[in-house]
Image (cartoon, grey):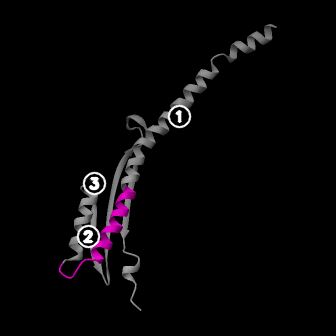
């Protein structure tokens, strides 16, 4: 009987330690998600806004400059999606379409207290696709 009592006394407290370790891991993963998800969402939203902007530029009338229309749409989208002011933005007209490119980097704190920072790189070239580019054959 003494052997079972000694074995049980050495196992006491292990559930609390396991719970604490799991809670810490969940807190760290939750912190990383809270910091990374908004940055990734803003990047995906900017991609969609860039695609919309180049289609708007392609569909402009003869009195408007398509590059100016795309730049204005991009500036608004960049402000709404918290793009850093030092981002590289290039809008150029290619034969039959307009292209837009945005490149920037952001530091995302993945671990608490800034122990690890992830460098989120955004580099996207928006090219119009769809029925506006098809020839009327």
| Residue at image mark 1 | 25
Q: Does the residue at mark 1 contact the one at mark 2 (Cβ under 8 Å)?
A: no
Secondary structure mostly seen in the magenta stretch: helix
**28 lies left or right of 81:** right
Q: Position of residue 31 (x, y in %)?
A: 44, 38
Task: State yes or no: residue 54 in magenta.
Answer: yes
Q: Residue at x 59, y 23 (%)?
A: 17
Q: Which one is earlier in the sequence, the residue at label 1 or at label 3?
A: 1
- Residue 121's x, y, as percent? 38, 56
User: For the residue labelled by badge 2, is the local secondary structure a helix, a strand or a loop?
Assistant: helix
Q: Nearer the viewer, residue 36 or 135?
A: 135
Q: Quarter holding the C terminus?
A: bottom left
Q: How many marks are shown on the rendered structure? A: 3
- Measuring from the top left, give residue 105's x and y in whole percent: 34, 55
Separation of marks 1 and 2 at Cα, in angstroms: 45 Å
In this view, the residue in front, 104 or 100, is 100
- Using residue 72 as the reference point, say whether residue 45 is left or right of it: right
Mark 1 surroundings within 10 Å by alpha-carbon count, few (fewer than 14), some (14 through 19), many (20 or more): few
Disc 1, SS: helix
Q: Quadrant of residue 86?
A: bottom left
Label of residue 70 in the image: 2
Residue named by callout 3? 80
């Amino acid at each position: 009987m003494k052997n079972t009592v000694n074995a049980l006394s050495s196992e006491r407290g292990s559930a609390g330690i396991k719970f604490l370790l799991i809670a810490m891991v969940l807190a760290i993963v939750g912190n990383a998600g809270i910091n990374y998800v908004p940055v990734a969402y803003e990047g995906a939203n900017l991609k969609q806004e860039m695609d919309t902007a180049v289609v708007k530029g392609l569909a402009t009338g003869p009195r408007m400059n398509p590059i100016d229309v795309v730049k204005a749409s991009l500036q608004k989208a960049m402000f709404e999606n918290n793009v850093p002011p030092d981002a590289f933005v290039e809008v150029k007209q290619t034969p039959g379409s307009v292209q837009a490119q945005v490149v920037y980097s952001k530091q995302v704190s993945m671990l608490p207290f800034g122990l690890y920072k992830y460098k989120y790189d955004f580099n996207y070239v928006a090219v119009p696709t769809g029925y506006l580019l098809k020839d009327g054959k």
